[in-house]
Image (cartoon, rainbow, N blue to C red):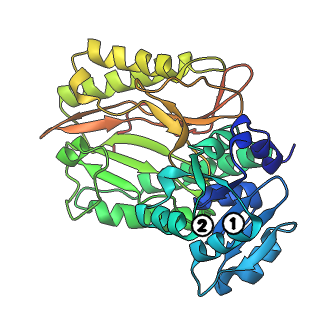
Amino acid sequence: MTRLERFLAQPLFSQFDAALILRREDMRYLSGYTGEGALLISREDKLLITDFRYIVQAKVQAPGWTVTESQRGNTLDTVIALAREKGYASLGVEESHLTYAGFQQLSKGIGAVRFEDIGNTVEKLRAIKEPQELRAIAKAAQVADMGLRKILDFVKPGMTEKEVQIELAYQCGKLGSQGFGFEFIVASGPNGAMPHAVAGGRKIQPGDLVTIDMGCLVDGYNSDMTRTFAIGNVSDELKKIYDTVLKAQLAALEALGPGKNGKEVDAVARGIIAEAGYGDYFGHALGHGVGLMVHELPRLSPLIDMQLEPGMAVTVEPGVYVPDLGGVRIEDLCIVTQEGYLNLCSTTKELIVL
């Protein structure tokens, strides 16, 4: 079955006449089109609505779809006109990706139409990757590994976090990354206590731990990896934190595999960190899916029950973040396989001392 056929085969599709897809990654997944606009899908129609800038691109990237130029550049006005023309009485929408203003516009424009939330139906389909998707993710991970190794020869005390971030992005671009799904995190010393710290002007100093969270992009697919390394000798407390996080990460990897629940895998790492006395300093989920988006389904989280299946790409990234001291995060990107998992990250996880 094609991606679109699998979407149309979802049981919820019997609850409405057509589905409106607005999230860009979902549009790309179902149609191949990478620009802006919307998809309006029924069992009879495959409509792609976009503005003048993307008409030629849409026709090239989405053969078999009826491409319609939006009226006055307003996508939702054109959706309204098409829905009225087709006589749709009910419309499935991605509620979390439709603004309140957009919903009001649709409601008033179409009239007596019933809206149904399709939730993350397309994202769930995206969670299990096809072979060509996995190849792109693996290539992106390989580029990230090579880029990080180069940067480890570059980092010196006295450099700012921003200098390291810029050089890392430059090296990854030279090695083949076609873009970046997020701004690389370079967090040194006490800044490491912020899981999503913004690289800035702080100078890297002897005795620091430095955390780098990075990912590359190949053919539209992301990778994600984090390593923490030391600048010279670090305190016994920081070494203990590093050893704890590494132990938790390795144990979680051992628990990873098909049929496992993401909540269960998270609990393995969380228990080890709590036992070491750092439970209050690990406040995020253990992992997330990676693909067209850096953060997508599945989730390894204490809050979500989701069974892992072969073909899923997921991170395993425990961390400990202690205010005024620093932090450690170690992250691998793995593919769930029939036998267990394949780790796409090869950079060592032993504490590197620069």
For residue 213, which numbered disc appears in the image? none
Secondary element under disc 2, as helix, strand or loop, is helix
In this image, 345 relative to 40: left or right?
A: left
Image quadrant of residue 47? bottom right
In the picture, the quarter occupied by the C terminus is top left
Quadrant in which the N terminus appears: top right
User: Which residue, given by chain and number where applicable, does mark 1 sit on?
Assistant: 83
In the rendering, at what x and y percent does residue 241 appear?
27, 26
Identify which residue is drawn at 82% across, 61% down. 45
Q: Marks 1 and 2, how far apart in space?
A: 7 Å
Direction front: furthest residue: 112
Secondary structure beneath label 1: helix
Q: Residues within 10 Å of mark 1 (few under 14, many from 20)?
A: many
Q: Is residue 212 left or right of residue 274?
A: right
Would you place residue 2 above or below residue 332 in this image? below
Residue at the spot of label 2: 110
Q: Nearer the viewer, residue 14 or 286?
A: 14
Relative horizontal placement of residue 171, taking residue 33 as reference (left or right): left
Give the mark count.
Answer: 2
Residue 222 appears in the figure: no
Percent x, y of residue 162:
31, 64
User: Which numbered disc, 1 or 2, marks the residue that appears first in the sequence?
Assistant: 1
Q: Quadrant of residue 346?
A: top right
Task: Return the x and y of residue 184 as percentages of the image width and height.
Answer: 41, 57
Please say if 88 is above or below 341. below
Cβ atoms at labels 1 and 2 below 8 Å apart: yes
**Residue that appears at 63% across and 20% down:** 257
Q: Amino acid at mark 1?
A: Ala
Residue 49 percent coordinates (x, y): 69, 73
Q: Amino acid at mark 2?
A: Ile
Name which residue lies at 64% across and 76% down: 78
